[in-house]
Image (cartoon, helix red, strand yellow):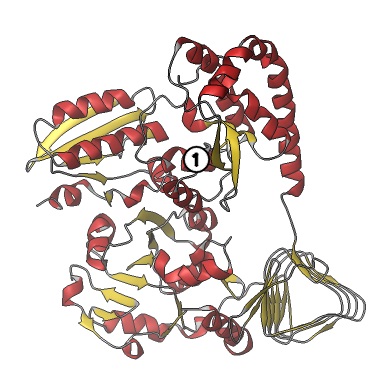
Amino acid sequence: MKCLILAREANYAWVKNYFPDITACLLKVVNKPLPEFYIDLCSLLKIEEIRFVTDFSSQEIEKLLENGDRWGVHITYNLAREEDTIDKILLKNNSFCRDCDLLIIDDSIFINYDKDNIEPVISAFENTDSFDAGCIKFLKAGVSMKDAQVITPQDAPFSYSRITGIVEYYNLSMDILSKLKHCFVLPGYIHERDAFLGSNTEIGRGVNIEPPILAGDNVRFRELTKVGPNAVFGDNVLIDSQTTVENCIIYDYTYIGSELEVNKMIAYKNHLISGTTGEMIKITNDFLISGVERRIILSFMERLVQSFFTAILIVLLFIPYMCMYLIKLYWEAKYPYKKEYFIKKNGKIAKLPTMSQVPDSFFKRVFTFFNLDRYSLLFFVWRGQLRLVGNKLLDVQPKHLMLIKDLPDYQPGVFNYADTMHDDISDYDGMHEGFYYAYQSFGMDMKILFRALFKRKS
Amino acid sequence: MNIEYQKQNDVGILIIHGRLDAYNAPTLKTQFQEYSKDTANFVFDLHNLDFLDSTGLGSIVACLKAASEAGGDIRIANMSEKPRLVFQITRAYKIFEIYDDLETAVASFS
C-alpha cells in the first residue's frame, strides 16, 4: 500500500491569520508538525511509499521531512494546481498511484489512532473494499475514484478530526496532551510523570511543574514559576519568574514576562490568542511577552557590509557623476524626476529619483552604462531604506502591490537580479524575484553587483 | 543543452537534456518555433534536465504563451528534483499542468 497526502493551501487559510510565519501545513499539533503524525501512521500501517502533493511551495515540508529515511519510508513530492480535483491529481501522479493499494489523506485532519492497538486497523484495510470517507479515501489497486464506495467517516477504519480553525486546533492539542497522549509517539528527553522535557531544559528554584506538560529544547523556567497542567512549550522559550502558565501552547522563540498568569492561551511571538474564542491580542510591551529575535545580529552585519560597498561605489562614481551633472540637471528640469516606489513588503512607499521618463539618447546611454542613474539611490542605502543588492524596485501600481504581498519577502535594492538577466520576461515578473529570494546569499549578491556594474542590461 | 523531439498522437514531445539557463534559453525558443509549425500541443519531458534557472524557465513560459496563442498547451512530465525546486519558488506550477509520467501527460491531451 502507498499513501498520497494532499495539502491544499485553502484548507489551511486560517493558519496564516494567526501564525503568518509558519508554513501552514507544518503547524505543530502538541509537539509535532501535522505531517509527522501522518508519517507515523504510515509506518505503523507498513506503508513505505508516501507522496506529498501540494498546491503551494512544498520547500519547507521537504526541508523538514526530506526523503523520509528517518521514518524508514520513502517520501516524494509533486505539485498540483489549486483547482485540481482528486481525479486530476490521481492522473497527474499516475506513475505513483497505479498498480497498488492507495490510502489518500485529503485535508487538514488529525487522524485518531492508537499506536499500541494498530492491528485491527491493519486488518480492516486488508478486508475492506475501496471507499471514500471524505477526507480519508482508500483505493484498491486498479480501482478508480468513481468506483469507490462512499461511506461515512465513522465507518472508516479510523476516525479523524478536521482542523478548521484556531479553537478546534487548541481543543485538539489540549485533548491529546491530557487524554490521548498514550496513543501517539511523543518523544522527550526526560519523561517523568507525564512531563516530557526536551534537552537543555533549565528549571529554576521553586518551580512547580504540574503534569501533563510537554517542552521542547532550550526551555527555561525561572524561579517560582508554575507550569501546567496541560502546557506545551516549543523550543527556545523563556518563562520569567513567578509566572503561571496552564492550559497553554507557547510557541518557539517566545518570552513570557514575570508575575503573569497565562491560562487557556496560545502565545506566538508577541501575540496572545485565546484558545476558547480565537481572539488575538498583540502585546506591545516587550517585558510582558515577545518573540526572541534570531536575526538581529546577522542583519546588522549584512547591513554593515552593504554600507561598506555602497561607500566604495559613491567614491568611485563621484567624478563621472560630476562630469555629467549639468546634463542631469537639465533632465531634472525637463522631465518628472521623482517617482513613487514600494520600499517595504507592507506596502510602504517612498519617492525616489528615477530616469525612467527621460527619452533614450546618447547621453542617457552613457549615463546608464556607468550606472550613474543609480548614483542618487546609493544614499538611500545609507539611510536604511534600500539595500545595495536586493529585489527589483517596483513602482506604485496595484499589480506590483499584489506581487509584493505574494513574495515571501521584499527588500528592494539599488541593484537587482532581474536587471542583470538578459531576457524578456515581463508578463511574469515574480519569477526572478522568487528565484532571487530562494538563492539569495552574500556570494550571489556580489555576483549580481558585479554583473550590474560591468554587464548591465542597457 | 540538447533537445530530443518526438511526435506521438499529434502531441510534440520535447525531451530536454542538460542545462537550460540564460545561455541556452534562446535556443529552446528558436527550436520551439520550428516544432510549433508541426503541432500545437506539447509535453516537455524534464527527466534529464540537470539545471534550470529563472531565465530558462522564462523560455518555457514563452513557449507556453506561443502554444496558447496557437490554441494548444504545454504540459510538463517527469520533472526531476532540481527543476521542481525552481517551479516551486517561482510559482510556475500554477500555470503548468505537471504529470509524473510521460505517457499520462501525452494521453491527457486526448
Residue ranking furthest to the front: A333
Give the residue displayed 53% in from the left and 59% down from the top: A70
| Residue A24 on image: x %, y % | 50, 65
- Callout 1 environment at 10 Å: few (<14), some (14 to 19), or many (20+)? some
- Look at the image and tell me in which quarter the N terminus of chain A lies: bottom left
Q: Quadrant of residue A428?
A: top left
On screen, residue A39 versus residue A314, left or right, reads left
Does A81 appear above or below A448? Answer: below
What is the secondary structure assignment of the residue under circle 1? strand
| Amino acid type for the residue under numbered disc 1 | Asp
Does A191 appear above or below A321? Answer: below
Which residue is identified by label 1? A395
| Residue A165 on image: x %, y % | 50, 78
Q: Which one is nearer the viewer's eye here, A400 or A101?
A: A400
- Look at the image and tell me in which quarter the C terminus of chain A lies: top left
| Residue A35 on image: x %, y % | 48, 67
